[in-house]
Amino acid sequence: MGTVVSWMLPLLLLMQLEVRESSDFHLPGDYLLGGLFTLHANIKGISHLNYMQVPQCKDYEVKVLGYNLMQAMRFAVEEINNDSHLLPGVSLGYEMVDVCYLTNNIQPVLYFLAKENFNLPIQQDYSSYEPRVVAVIGPDTSESVVTVSNLLSLFLLPQITYSAISNQFRDKSLFPALFRTIPSGEHQIKAMIQLITYFGWNWVIVILSNDDYGRENSQLFNEKLAEQKICVALQESLPVPLGNQTLLPQEKRRLEAIVDKIQNSSAKVVVVFSLDLALYDFFKEAISQNIVGYVWIASESWSVDPVIHSIPRIQQIGTFLGICTQNIPIPGFSDFRVWKAPEGRPAADKKRSGPTCNQECDTCLDTLKSYSTILTRSGDLVAYNVYSAVYTVAHALHRLLGCNGTSCARDTVYPWKLLQEIRKVDFTLLGQRIYFDKNGDLPMGLEIIQWQWDVDHNPFKKIAFYNPAQQYLSNVATNISWNTPNNSAPFSVCSNSCQLGQRKKPMGLHICCFECINCPAGTYLNQSADDFECQSCPQNEWSHEGDTRCFRRHQRFLQWREPATMLVALLAGLGFLGTVGALAVFCAHSHTPVVRSAGGRLCFLMLAPLLVAYCAVPVYVGRPSAATCLCRQVLFNLCFTLCMACITVRSFQIVCVFKMARRLPRAYACWVRYGGAYVSVGLLALLKAAIVTANVLLAPSGLAARSDPADPRVLVLGCNGHYGRALLLNTSLDLALSVLAFGFSYAGKELPTSYNEAKFITLSMTFYFVSSVFLCTFMSVYQGVLVTTFDMAVTVLNLLGVSAGYFGPKCYVILFYPERNTPAYFNSVIQGYTMRRE
């Protein structure tokens, strides 16, 4: 007993190691197959099947679909036994048991595992154990499969389920002996979601049965929806009736509440994951509350259920679509399906008292026959799953027994050996390749079907096909009959689609519920990227409010043809010519007292940068570039600062000559001896060069584009965005020098007129200071094309202020008053000033 799992022992002891009660729906054969089917819903106990006789048979007391699958197994077994090539000399038998949905699982499994004497021995090693059956077909629900498989796996007895879709069965470490002839639940849900997406629905209701099937599949459905733009408006679970199919009062009230919520919801698509047992009362309640105009999407568990299809007036509540396995016709099965009881069948056991799971009566064949038409017209949907499962076992036996065209070996078939052969089967059955992948699944297609109630047509019409390998929905029919007034697909979205150029603003928790808002100017909506956020236009493009794309902006920059540009250029030309003239005059009279009083050689150090600065004015005009921006940032600043340094030093020097020479003679002597004027100008020039270099490194020059504040459709081309701050930092030294020059000039306002340039310097420095502050302030609050115009104008005017304010009076004296440009005149002026001071 060492190898038997411990939890199994109490169960075996409780059953007294015997299985006495079993179904006698039995066909003898050399090798038996176990068949587990859900056939009856009136669950009271376990008894004989006895040809499926049920007293007081109501439409839902006999599960017609289960009966149909049972007949498919019988048909396959008899067809194989009549085939002299697949298993020559060997016949298959079967034991069929009604599992009564969930309650009758353990007893038949123990019966299948037992020997002919109904004993199930406890052994250390079951590798040589020969159970009653060689394989088990079924059961149908995932809950039943888990229970059955946990027992069969201990013996490695092959089990092939025909309708359990749970994804947990793909784990071969937990279910080593389990195979499926139906695609997994993941593929069925993917097909369902693609169907919903195809018709543009994104607002759905999910109804599930309150059991493992409903909970597991609805959870998987919600997980897959998270990858799509589909939202669940409402999710409710249906109560599962007890064995006698009678709803309790509180369950009845719950059904009424669920139907009422569906009616009050704006969603018109209802996805139903439920076993058929929980749906009869639900749909009857929906019919009684007169629900109309809905699309009901059925899971595979009830998508082709003829009993639900036959509920009176069910077609009034909407359009029914369902997911089911591929319909592969089985020749001869339609005639075989409605089974007639043979004459002289065993009489019913009248001694048995009380209701049982498989009850006995003489009237239920009429109930089953009533579904003959609908089963025949619907084809062999789902039946092929059982049919192929039986053939799979037969082909595995063929290989295991070493069959040839005439005979098979009469060897003992051990479950684990047959299991190995089932894993390797690969054959064609009715045009369909049969083999199992590594998860134990049979790759088969899925069909999307629509329910019809026209007596002359197939009640389950194929409208689309889903290929699990490609995971793609194809061949979608265009002639779907929608149960709507104008025969159009129902509309099931939380919010209407937004217009072009409108983004979605979420409302509540669902991404499917939103309001539409126009994208603001300067943005557009790229629906392929994001429906909820507007994307900004590229810098050189623009859009109006609600635009779906951006258009190129009109680029603006300072051009020569503009009047302001021509005026400033004219002034710059005049200033350049005037500066050239001043340079010529000073060169011609370089040894005269006027030139020496103006600074001597310092004057030429001022005039040369002025000329260079005038030549730099054209860089302000035309399309900006990195080179022109660098010239603006470097060339003019260095040139103008050199001029300002010379003016400041010269103003200080004049004050020193007349006011400080007497008070600080030694300092004055050092100033003269060591060339204090040139040293000061050189130090100031070096300081300015350091400031400009730091600006260039910290704020590199380059082309920048800015929106025109007056018209965002216009793109103003200029230098980089830090140009204003760089200009302010560069101008700070010049402003300080202008203040010093102004101070020294004011201090020397009483000096002799030949040396007194206070009025001119004061005027030019005041203009420079005011214009520079104005320019920096203007650039901080305005980013339009006028910035470049003002920058150029202020630059030219400041250059003119220095040229005209400092050199203009000197040239005037030299040219028009030569008598004042003599040493004698200067000496008389100095003597007169000295006598007044004394």
Image (cartoon, rainbow, N blue to C red):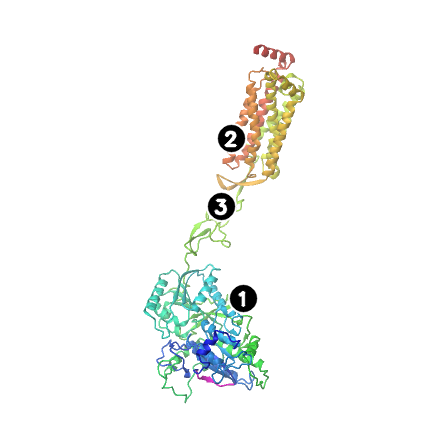
In which quarter of the view is residue 765 placed? top right
Name the residue tied to disc 1: 470
Name the residue at the bottom extreme. Answer: 344
What's the mark number on residue 769? Answer: none
Q: Residues within 10 Å of mark 2 (few under 14, many from 20)?
A: few
State the extent of the magenta-drawn residues as a range.
23-29
Q: Residue 341 placed where, x, y %?
A: 41, 85
Measure the C-alpha gap from mark 3 to mark 1.
42 Å
**136 relative position to 573: left or right:** left
Measuring from the top left, give residue 538's x and y in whole percent.
Answer: 53, 46
- Tell me, yes or no, if residue 134 can be seen here: yes
Q: Which residue is mark 2?
A: 774
- Circle 3 residue: 522
Which amino acid type is marked by label 1?
A: Gln
Q: Tag 2's secondary structure?
A: helix
Who comes first in sequence, dot 3 or dot 1? 1
